[in-house]
Image: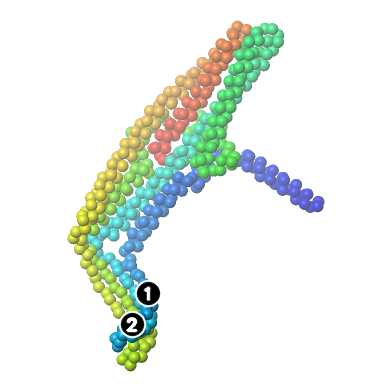
Amino acid sequence: MRISRIAGVILVLLFANISSAVAQDTWSLQRCVDYALQNNLTVKQQVVQKRLADLTLQQSQLQRIPNFRASTDAGYSDGRLAALGNNQYVNQSVFTANGSLNMDGNLFSWFYLQKTIAANRLDAHANSFLLEKARNDLAFNVATAFLQILLNIQTVNVNEENVRLTNSNLDNTKKLVIAGSVPESNQADLEAQLAQDSTNLVTAQNNVIISILQIKAYLNLGFEIPFKPEVPDNISSLPLAPLQEMAPEMVYSAALTNYPLVKSDQLKIQSATKAYQAAKAQLYPSLGIGGNLNTNYANNYYDQTNKLIPFRQQIDNTFRKYIGVNLSIPIFNGWQQRTTVAKAKMNVYSQELTRDIDNQKLKQDIYTAHANAVAALQKYNASSTGVMAAQKAYDFATKRFNLGLMNTIDYITTQSKLFRAQVDKVSAQYDYIFKMKLLEFYRDQKISL
């Protein structure tokens, strides 16, 4: 009994330590990205597509090996049949068996197989870049979601400070009301403001929860699992490339070299071209080789003395071999193959249009991101100035309010302007970081915080 109690205490302490370790566990951006790359469902789906393309390539390569097929069949019949050997018709029950081994292969088909293999190899390579794109996009989306969490946490901090200030002012006002220095309406106004500030805080806290749910979806992490982000000591210290080094044409030029979708589109065009050449090859004759081995057995196979020929002897007597070549010449099949060739040619053009559309969108996205980055920087600079001005106005207003020279409504308005300026600054700061990281992503296909 004593031992079981000690064991119970040990288990309680052990699980307490485990729970404490889980509670203190934090998620850095790098950990989030690594985990997402291993578990994200979209990436897993793209892995499947890559594997399917690899299997298609493998199958086309194996088509160069001749086909071998073995077959056997057996049957039973009853009635008036001719006996093998003497051809006499008698009522009998007959068991027959047949075995064969067949081979056929392609000797020459105007390079159809080679072009098909080349097309499938290029398509498999293109799918490798699509997988890389899926992983890069996921890393960027995770980083964006991580930044959103940090922004929402900062917004909570600003709201908490605002609630603290309102609470402090309310406490001072209550004392002044009791002393008869200010009217009771001042206290009521601040209580109403505290209720509004508390509502804003609850909204900000809920935004943190929502943004954490978003990143959990990217990570394919259980929504019930605790998630605590690793918050940088100073978001302003995050490394950012100078905006002047992010000219849109320069970023676009780098993207044409690094962006996986661009590489995939190029390979898709080459694959479609090879497929077109393979389709044309089927308009020409093809040369093949074939052969087979065959033998039979029947239980009504008699010799001239009406004696059943033994199984082994029958197999030897009926054993046949064949080998030959065949020339297949397409003449007319309702223009089916020529239609296939025309479709393959149009597919090349379609892939070229897809490339042009993707490149146009990429360029548009980069120019848009650059314009947004410029605007975000200007907004951040303006909001920084706005915070300093609002803080100075609030400090003066606090002195006047404490001296009874400012009414509560005006004072609350001044405090609200400071709060809004602080929120705008935090939002503008994160918006600028996001826009610059987006440009860095287009340029380098990498993301870091």
**Which of pointers 2 and 1 lies earlier in the amino acid sequence?**
1
Q: Amino acid at mark 1?
A: Asp
Q: Is residue 405 above or below residue 341?
A: above
Q: Residue at the far bottom: name it.
A: 305
Residue named by callout 2 = 80
Does dot 2 land on a helix, a strand or a loop?
strand
Residue 97 or residue 165, whichever sits in front: 97
Q: Is residue 110 left or right of residue 231?
A: left
Residue sitting at 33 percent across and 52 percent down? Answer: 122
Does residue 10 sit above or below 67 in this rendering?
above
User: What x and y, as percent, mark residue 65?
Assistant: 33, 66
Quadrant in the picture for residue 79: bottom left
Q: Is residue 379 above or below residue 442?
A: above
Residue 147: give its label.
none
Q: CA distance from mark 2 to mark 1?
A: 22 Å
- In x, y percent, where is residue 91? 35, 84
Q: Kindly indicate the quadrant of the structure image that contains residue 225.
A: top right
Residue 226 lies, with reference to residue 427, above or below; the image says below
Residue under label 1: 73
| Most foreground residue, 57 or 309 | 309
Residue type at tag 2 = Arg
At 30% across and 51% down in the image, what residue appears? Answer: 271
Does the rendering let one see residue 184? yes
Indicate left or right for 391 with 74 as reference. Answer: right
- Left or right of 52 on screen, residue 326: left
Circle count: 2
- Displayed quadrant of residue 418: top right
Relative side of 162 to 103, left or right: right
Packing grade of label 2 (10 A; few <14, some 14-19, many >=20) is: few
Residue 397 appears at what percent x and percent y? 57, 11
